Image: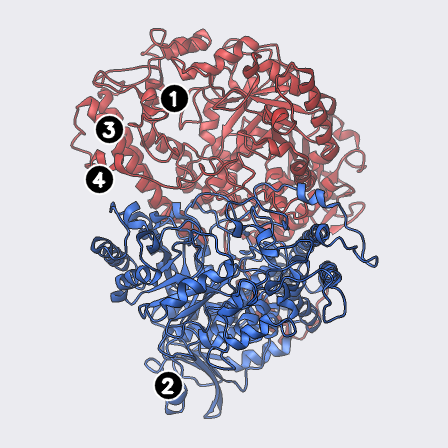
Chain colours: A blue, B red
């Protein structure tokens, strides 16, 4: 570019741009998530990136490559304030991107081996010196691999990493990396705390909300490749042609970002929208109805992913209504989508009509006997723990127990039991705790992650699903830090070996700032945040003691829901003798569902980790803990420590004002105030409630509760989010 | 500013800023409404503005003045890329802003007269030459006047108007300029088509959504000074302390923008949340309960505006439940808020338990006899027409009929009967039609606007209310052009004498572009758009023939709601003999509720305007119209013309791509496609349905309907927005 202006005019224009720079800054509403692409503030680093990427070789002749290229260009423009010259063949330092079939450099012999190992979604990034110039090559076998590679490079720039000696080969550990939307057709979201459903069914198919594209970009950037559009508590209407046409419009919008659409299927749909008399999975008319429905769907959505099914659970219909089992139901649907290469994700979260002696045992009891009976395109979706997404649970006993069956992990990103969208809780440590757990199913080292990634049985399909925390809120997730949970989910689904700290590091840099002080201080409290919440909600293995209605706040006294195993008192079993659920071999023997080594560790008080103590044992209030304290004192201490840690987090955040825009800084401050109030409510309510059984004093060193127990029992909250509306 | 850089670095920085300018552009999501403040593209004009405002004298020492100053600075920075030097006394061309009490120039003798005439909300803007420099002075008696003056100046800049010889004195025509939110506590919005409620009750009072401030800015910019936070179909919970504390937090956020908070009050609240046995307005315990409740509210919200009440209507409780009348009910509440200077807005939209011979007569019958019986702080809220916000209605007969009672106009900004948020309908002409109607109540010239602005009786308080079309959608209103209806409402409430065209002109320039071609072409179809919609929905005085459930699309055949006067067939009365509602002196005599001159004009076929023909007359299908055509042929013609006009609008818009960002251009295109589909559906459904009575052919010159009548009758729409959820 040549500039010929007299100095006066140049100064004027410069002044103009400086002012533009100031005024054009849009309010920091969080909408851009971690894909901000603001100019890199380290000038020399930006300059080194610019000279390393002075040219671009990136042939793009299909929608996926197009999307990747558009993202790259907008990313480079923002981050580097620079657009590399686009060339057919590099004549200087260049970024070269492609597949063997469209790029001669990538097709070269030097990349043959790496490409062979990358599968369909993988990519490599390699620094190559040829003929006096340095090239950065992103190569993949498919357009999707290219897309993921481009996002990885952008992440390296966003996090200010060196790019001059790269030699990365990366591919996902599981095939299906899926967001489950518990979104109803009326746009309410079950367990949604970030507004309402982003899917605007009324205006579909004609109106494509620009938000759909930004949703797709965000997901692609972290490797998510599937989305279930509607709630597992499904409405059969979503399978009518009227709604399928709308789903197809969404599928068209997401496709260039490598994301497939799935639907939750209501098992009784053949009756409700098909006019049949039965939904019996062995009935030929039912089989035909589903096969025809699958054909219809695939005509509209050629790459439709398949069905997610919640059957015979919490009132949902299922095969058991017809005397069949889960395999009968799942296989029937699997046969319908198999000709189109679709899959069926069948949930193991089931409720028997009869209240069991131990709720925790149910999924194992129903599914374990069916091992080996499912079609190869069925994958059983198993929650991380056997109860229900609690702040902490031991790993689900089904992992490792069904060696001939594909199992996928179901996580809950949305914070149903983790303080909704007002508590800062970074969930990666919770996920890792499950992934790294050793099932011992085939001896030591048989971790959950090995089960999930097909290391135990390479014939099985693999996947990880997360219940989305996404809604219509400007910042998508309600809490600026809740975005980190969406982000971490994707990153861990792609590569479960990554550490919580590395992911938090990337996210903080991309979302807020590359400042060392900021990243170090904030990362520290992020990593601690889940344990904080366990402390002020459910320490020492307690679980499911939230308010029965709406799951908002504490309700350990609640006992009025129709099923015993929906009520908190069923779970904590506090009485004059002590507290905790006896799941030992002397109790419900839930420990018996684990491999012997695990069973013994949980069963044996001497071996059982404190964090699971009251999950597996009912213990007297004066039981002597490892610390030497009584159980009562240690329980109280956990609750008080939990609240104190929120205060400590606030103090750190209050120092971060210089690193963060005032909008998000203030938002987080306000939300932390809510979190502190609620943590205190949890502490005061639980400690005083349990005290009615322990009859032991709160040690004098702790401040007194703010209000008496009755105050907390009398509190009523109306219109708690995440509960309203028919589906 | 002095710049000393070598040329090389200067060029580099310049290049950087040019690129920044490109990349910093945030997606045009419509969030900024008409307050965009992008740089003025006419460089010489911008320069002339800059030199006229080289200095700023603006002492600001309270929150309202602070808000005004912040707005001014951000507006000037954006529009002019310029921040005037702030000085105590002008030494060059300056913008001088203030009140007599804080600014010596404004306090000068030359402004005494103008200030005397401005009241509390008015302001003047005047160009003044003193001592060789030119000053632009914005003066007002109050901080609110200053705020409105600042927004007016910004509008002049945004619309590229000359500012060198200004002499404006401006003040609102009515005191209460109010948005009614039909927002439920569960965040659904009754008749809301732009997402969900912006009030996030769950996170209040701690979390102040930045959206509240932008909402306040937008309202202040058009003179709106009050907002009713909750639905007229009210939940008594909103009057509990739990929710009042949250409402107070909203009030605190809106206060610096001159906006007061009001609440809809459920008449039976003393029973539901007060524990009383009755809500009888003459019962002393009830009176005391409301007085105490008012005291409680004013302790939390010292400038609380007052109550809005829907009583004895569509199932809502009211004084008639206790054998009392509307005056008894309204006065009791008025007495409760009077000590705090609050008001009661009491709706005239009432339903008797018995279905009347003519629904249109009901409000008049119940309220007219009460004229003179209401307290001075009660204002009766009367819809523009006697039925219910139809695409077209004659003015409400209550206007002019209650000379001793304060009446405020209730408009519906949200498009319940105007195609939701997918139809482009500019409503200003509809509002003007009502405002300019002559009631003849005190002789010729007794227009509705005179009634509303206190010209007929200066002792009465005055106001205009509009049911908001605002929701959580990124662009606030669902359709980019629906923003124009929020805008026009505020402008007309401030000054009903303004023309629809002038308001559209301002809005287009502020929202999209100052290009003459763009403004002229788009303004033309905006001004035509409401008539288009009348044509394809309810031409020639037809009304209330939308689908009975959800009010979405046509349903002239609907006849299954429990009350006759909720069903379309009650209103169009089509049969073999003809069509239309006979409201003449021979029929229901609704015409008798108007002044004689109006009555005769509507009653007499020769005088009755075509636009109201079937509102007042039942006429045979072959009735000869003024045009010479039969009624049937003309009816058909209107429907076809309506659809054609949507197509014409599309063609114009399709040429506007060069003037509008691609995001909003595409959005409008997609929405216009929906509008065309729906207009066609209205046409084909209505024409074919009425044909079953007329037995006359659709003239050959028109294309055939797309589908047979039964197709339209069979269509079912689920989860229609604006209807769901408990309140």
Residue A386 % position (x, y): 51, 63
Q: Distance between the residues labelled 3 and 1?
A: 22 Å
Determine which quarter of the picture holds residue B318. Answer: top right
Count of numbered tags:
4
What is the chain identity of the residue bearing mark 1? B
Q: Horizontal placement of B140 versus B270: left or right?
A: right
Marks 2 and 4 belong to one chain: no
Task: Name the residue beneath numbered marker 1.
Answer: B563
Give residue B689's mark.
3
- Mark closer to the chain start, 4 or 3: 3
Residue A34 % position (x, y): 55, 65
Task: Name the residue beneath numbered marker 4.
Answer: B706
Classify mark 1: helix, strand or loop: loop
Determine which quarter of the picture holds residue B649. Answer: top left
What is the chain identity of the residue bearing mark 4? B
Residue A416 % position (x, y): 55, 55
- In the displayed structure, B520 sits above or below A679; it is above
- In the displayed structure, A166 sits above or below B435; it is below
- Mark closer to the chain start, 1 or 4: 1
Residue B48 % position (x, y): 62, 49
- In the displayed structure, B447 sits above or below B636; it is above
Task: Name the residue beneath numbered marker 2.
Answer: A116
- Mark closer to the chain start, 3 or 1: 1
Classify mark 4: helix, strand or loop: loop
Category of crowding for the residue at label 2, using alpha-carbon neighbours closer than 10 angstroms: few (below 14), some (14–19), many (at least 20): few
- Residue pushed farthest right? A700
Q: How far apart are marks 1 and 2 (CA)?
A: 72 Å
């Amino acid at each position: 570019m040549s500039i010929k202006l007299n100095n006066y005019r140049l100064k004027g224009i410069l002044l103009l741009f400086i002012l533009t720079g100031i005024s054009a800054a849009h309010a920091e509403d969080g909408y851009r998530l971690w894909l901000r692409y603001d100019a890199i503030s380290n000038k020399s680093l930006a300059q080194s990136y610019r000279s390393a990427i002075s040219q671009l070789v990136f042939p793009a002749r299909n929608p996926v490559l197009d999307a990747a290229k558009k993202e790259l260009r907008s990313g480079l423009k923002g981050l580097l304030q620079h657009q590399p010259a686009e060339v057919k063949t590099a004549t200087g330092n260049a970024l070269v991107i492609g597949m063997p079939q469209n790029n001669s450099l990538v097709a070269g012999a030097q990349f043959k081996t790496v490409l062979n190992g990358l599968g369909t979604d993988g990519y490599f990034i390699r620094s190559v010196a040829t003929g006096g110039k340095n090239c950065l090559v992103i190569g993949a076998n498919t357009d999707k691999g290219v897309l993921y590679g481009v996002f990885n490079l952008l992440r390296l720039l966003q996090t200010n990493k060196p790019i001059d000696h790269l030699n990365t080969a990366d591919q996902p550990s599981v095939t299906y990396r899926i967001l489950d939307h518990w979104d109803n057709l009326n746009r309410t979201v079950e367990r949604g705390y970030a507004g309402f459903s982003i899917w605007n069914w009324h205006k579909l198919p004609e109106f494509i909300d620009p938000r759909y594209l930004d949703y797709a970009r965000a997901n692609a950037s972290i490797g998510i490749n599937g989305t279930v559009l509607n709630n597992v508590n499904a409405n059969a209407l979503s399978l009518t042609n009227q709604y399928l046409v709308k789903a197809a419009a969404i599928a068209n919008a997401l496709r260039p970002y490598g994301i497939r659409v799935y639907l939750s299927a209501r098992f009784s749909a053949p009756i409700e929208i098909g006019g049949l008399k039965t939904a019996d999975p062995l009935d030929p008319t039912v089989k035909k109805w589903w096969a025809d429905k699958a054909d219809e769907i695939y005509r509209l959505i050629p790459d439709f992913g398949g069905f997610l099914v919640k059957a015979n659970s919490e009132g949902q219909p299922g095969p058991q209504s017809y005397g069949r089992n889960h395999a009968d139901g799942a296989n029937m649907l699997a046969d319908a989508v198999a000709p189109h290469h679709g899959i069926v994700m069948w949930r193991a979260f089931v409720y028997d009509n009869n209240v069991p002696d131990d709720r925790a045992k149910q999924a194992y009891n129903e599914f374990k006997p069916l091992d080996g009976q499912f079609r190869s395109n069925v994958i059983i979706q198993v929650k991380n723990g056997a109860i229900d997404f609690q702040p902490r649970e031991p790993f689900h006993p089904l992992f490792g127990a069904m060696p001939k069956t594909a199992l996928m992990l179901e996580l809950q990103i949305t914070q149903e039991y983790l303080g909704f969208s007002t508590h800062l809780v970074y969930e990666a440590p919770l996920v890792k705790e499950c992934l790294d757990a050793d099932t011992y199913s085939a001896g030591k080292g048989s971790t959950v992650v090995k089960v999930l990634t097909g290391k135990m049985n390479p014939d099985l399909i693999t996947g990880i699903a997360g219940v989305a925390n996404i809604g219509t809120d400007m910042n998508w997730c309600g809490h600026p830090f809740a975005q980190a949970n969406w982000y971490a989910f994707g990153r861990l689904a792609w590569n479960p070996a990554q550490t919580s700290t590395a992911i938090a590091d990337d996210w903080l840099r991309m979302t807020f700032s590359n400042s060392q002080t900021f990243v170090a201080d904030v990362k520290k409290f992020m990593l601690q945040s889940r344990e904080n919440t366990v402390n002020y909600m459910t320490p020492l293995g307690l679980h499911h003691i939230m308010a029965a209605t709406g799951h908002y706040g504490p309700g350990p006294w609640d006992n009025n829901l129709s099923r015993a195993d929906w009520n908190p008192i069923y779970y904590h079993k506090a009485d004059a003798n002590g507290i905790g659920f006896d799941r030992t071999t002397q109790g419900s023997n839930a420990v018996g569902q684990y491999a012997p080594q695990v069973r013994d560790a949980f069963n044996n008080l001497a071996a059982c980790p404190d964090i699971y103590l009251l999950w597996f044992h009912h213990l007297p209030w004066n039981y002597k803990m490892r610390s030497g304290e009584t159980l009562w004192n240690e329980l109280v201490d956990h609750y008080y420590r939990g609240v104190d840690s929120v205060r400590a987090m606030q103090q750190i955040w209050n120092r971060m004002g210089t690193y963060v825009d005032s909008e998000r800084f203030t938002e987080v401050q306000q939300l932390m105030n809510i979190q502190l109030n609620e943590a205190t409510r949890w502490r005061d309510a639980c400690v005083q409630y349990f005290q009615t059984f322990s009859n032991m004093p709160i040690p004098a060193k702790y401040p007194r509760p703010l209000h008496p127990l009755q105050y907390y029992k009398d509190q009523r909250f109306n219109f708690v989010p995440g509960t309203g509306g028919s589906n």
